[in-house]
């Protein structure tokens, strides 16, 4: 084996060690609209449809992200393992590219004399520290945040191509286009530009603290609703001003050092400036800035060890041994903390309980914990969490409407339909464009026999979100009860197209077709329901009966 392959293998081994326990994590938070509730990823053709972002998904566009999700769905459906594998592959690829960037830079004419013989080793340590750092878990373990890691991979590839083009005698530079568009609510009514900018000084200081001591990581800080303490803002402002001044000086006097400073400031700037986005702070925003900090830290540590070795008159072997020992110790500690953090992503209840432990006034976290309890069937705990969320969330927050809607769904699960209607009506009042709340309200009204209002809300849900498969399905059930079989059939056929992995949809479609004497088509749908759920005994029995009727009709 050539020695040049040793370092990429070390990078791969370190990342697998840190993230080996991340593959069983379920879909959480923004994963839900982008993956389980996204009809566009359920097919690869037509390609244009597969590239579409889901209705109501955080952010806009991102066709490449949508395509990767569609490929994952084609591979494993809604089993999360392939999505985690894809995230890890993106991250490992980015680490390989970072290794190439640092190695080629250290072997360049400016730094070759000082670092050239050790370029590969130093680049590998920098890339590994960056790749296994706990701050990266949000971009790697949290599935939908491949948005951040894909963006990072393309930016790193762009820089690598520039370096390769500069080194090439043909001066051929290949640029990979990319855009660092940030999702979120630009100009959120909850936060002014000035207040957001003030908080970003403290946010940057917080990012840097977590870089060197990643003890308390948090999925949702909830800082969008409150201003940081003045001490944090003051410390952060001094730190950012010093960093900007030091970067300016270094660009003029020590360009390689200045480049690292510029890299950090420019890559953190899109989310930490005067333009408000929904969350004041998010750890995933350090995905690229962390590369500069880790590279600078590794180079500083190497210089420090070299100076100490010269002072102690140590041999090169002793210096190398000390460097390896220190690298293994630091990388091991970072990988251990990353693996520990991955445990929090193993369930929605775990990650949101951890978030609330750190941010007990975060209403959105309470809402998500309540939803997680609801999905786990723990309705009493869900009610308590959702009531707390409603208390904490401001009246203008869209999440408040979501909390009422979630509480309405819990009440439906408990069979308390009147309370469900009260909560879901409030959700619709706060957010009239919420198709999910309209659909759920229609279901609750149906349970109490108010079919006219139920149909009205279901039709509104479909008008707001034409690809809302559940609304089409629920409307078809009501229309069947009212005897409007033709429209019910159209709605069920639409629901089957939008919900291809739900066995009850082809089952209901089979029942409707069978009642109309279309036995051959009914058999196809019953068979599909059985394929999706092999233990679906009702579908098996109806398939048998339907086949008998089909044979009887054909014999006549």
Image (cartoon, grey):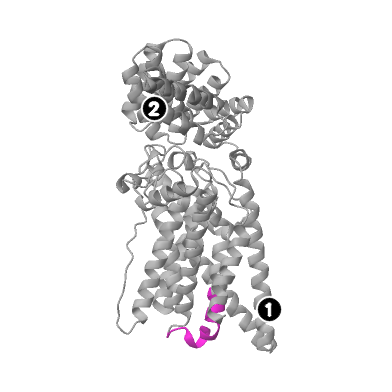
Residue marked by disc 2 = 520
| Cα gap from disc 1 to disc 2, whole angstroms | 75 Å
1 or 2: tag closer to the N-terminus: 1
Name the main secondary structure of what is drawn in magenta.
helix
In the rendered image, residue 40, in percent from the top left (x then y), is placed at 37, 41
Identify the secondary structure beneath mark 1: helix
In the rendered image, residue 129, in percent from the top left (x then y), is placed at 57, 66
In the rendered image, residue 58, in percent from the top left (x then y), is placed at 41, 42
Identify the secondary structure beneath mark 2: helix
Tell which of 258 and 345 is nearer to you. 345
Question: The magenta stretch spans which residues?
Answer: 109-123
Tell which of 528 and 484 is nearer to you. 528
Q: Quadrant of the C terminus?
A: top left
Tell which of 347 and 525 is nearer to you. 525
Q: Residue at x 33, y 65 (%)?
A: 176
Residue 350 visible, this orientation: yes
Q: Which mark is residue 322?
A: 1
Within the image, what quadrant is residue 294 found in? bottom right
Residue 429 visible, this orientation: no
Q: Residue at x 48, y 77 (%)?
A: 103
Residue at far front of view = 555
Q: Magenta segment: does it hold 178?
A: no
Q: Magenta segment: does it hold 119?
A: yes
Within the image, what quadrant is residue 514 found in? top left
């Amino acid at each position: 084996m050539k020695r040049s392959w040793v370092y990429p293998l070390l990078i791969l081994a370190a990342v697998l060690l840190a993230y080996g326990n991340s593959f069983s994590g379920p879909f959480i938070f923004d994963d839900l609209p982008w993956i389980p509730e996204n009809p566009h990823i359920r097919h690869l053709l037509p390609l244009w449809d597969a590239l579409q972002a889901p209705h109501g998904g955080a952010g806009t566009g991102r066709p490449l992200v949508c395509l990767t999700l569609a490929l994952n769905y084609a591979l494993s459906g809604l089993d999360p393992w392939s999505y985690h594998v894809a995230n890890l592959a993106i991250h490992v690829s980015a680490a390989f590219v970072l290794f190439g960037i640092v190695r080629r830079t250290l072997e360049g004419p400016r730094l070759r004399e000082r670092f050239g013989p050790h370029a590969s080793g130093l680049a590998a340590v920098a890339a590994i520290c960056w790749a296994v750092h706990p701050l990266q878990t949000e971009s790697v373990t949290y599935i939908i945040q491949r948005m951040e890691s894909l963006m990072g991979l393309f930016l790193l590839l762009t820089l690598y191509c520039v370096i390769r083009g500069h080194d090439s005698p043909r001066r051929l530079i290949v640029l990979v286009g990319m855009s660092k568009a940030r999702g979120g609510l630009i100009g959120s009514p909850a936060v002014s530009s000035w207040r957001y900018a003030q908080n970003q000084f403290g946010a940057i200081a917080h990012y840097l603290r977590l870089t060197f001591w990643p003890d308390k990581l948090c999925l949702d800080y909830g800082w969008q609703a409150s201003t940081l303490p003045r001490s944090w803002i003051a410390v952060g402002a001094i730190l950012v001003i010093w960093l900007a001044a030091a970067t300016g000086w270094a660009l003029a006097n020590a360009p390689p050092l200045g480049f690292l400073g510029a890299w950090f400031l420019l890559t953190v700037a899109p989310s930490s400036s005067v333009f408000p986005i929904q969350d004041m702070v998010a750890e995933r925003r350090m995905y690229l800035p962390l590369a500069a900090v880790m590279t600078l830290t590794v180079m500083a540590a190497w210089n420090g060890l070299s100076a100490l070795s010269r002072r102690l008159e140590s041999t090169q072997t002793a210096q190398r041994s000390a460097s390896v020992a220190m690298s293994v110790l630091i990388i091991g500690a970072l990988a251990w903390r990353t693996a520990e953090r991955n445990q929090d992503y193993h369930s929605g209840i775990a990650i949101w309980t951890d978030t609330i432990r750190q941010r007990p006034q975060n209403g959105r976290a309470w809402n998500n914990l309540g939803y997680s309890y609801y999905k786990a069937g723990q309705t009493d705990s869900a009610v308590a969490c959702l009531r707390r969320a409603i208390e904490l969330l401001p009246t203008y927050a869209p999440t408040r409407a979501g909390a009422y809607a979630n509480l309405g769904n819990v009440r439906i699960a408990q069979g308390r339909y009147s309370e469900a209607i009260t909560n879901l009506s409030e959700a619709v009042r706060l957010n009239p464009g919420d198709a999910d709340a309209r659909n759920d309200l229609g279901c609750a009204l149906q349970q109490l026999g108010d079919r006219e209002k139920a149909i009205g809300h279901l039709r509104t849900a479909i008008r707001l979100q034409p690809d809302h498969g559940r609304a089409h399905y629920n409307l078809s059930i009501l229309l069947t009860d009212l005897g409007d079989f033709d429209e019910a059939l159209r709605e069920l056929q639409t629901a089957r197209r939008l919900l291809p992995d739900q066995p009850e949809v082809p089952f209901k479609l089979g029942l409707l077709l069978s009642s109309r004497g279309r036995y051959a088509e009914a058999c196809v749908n019953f068979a599909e329901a059985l394929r999706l759920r092999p233990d679906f005994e009702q579908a098996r029995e109806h398939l048998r009966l339907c086949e008998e009727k089909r044979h009887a009709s054909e014999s006549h």
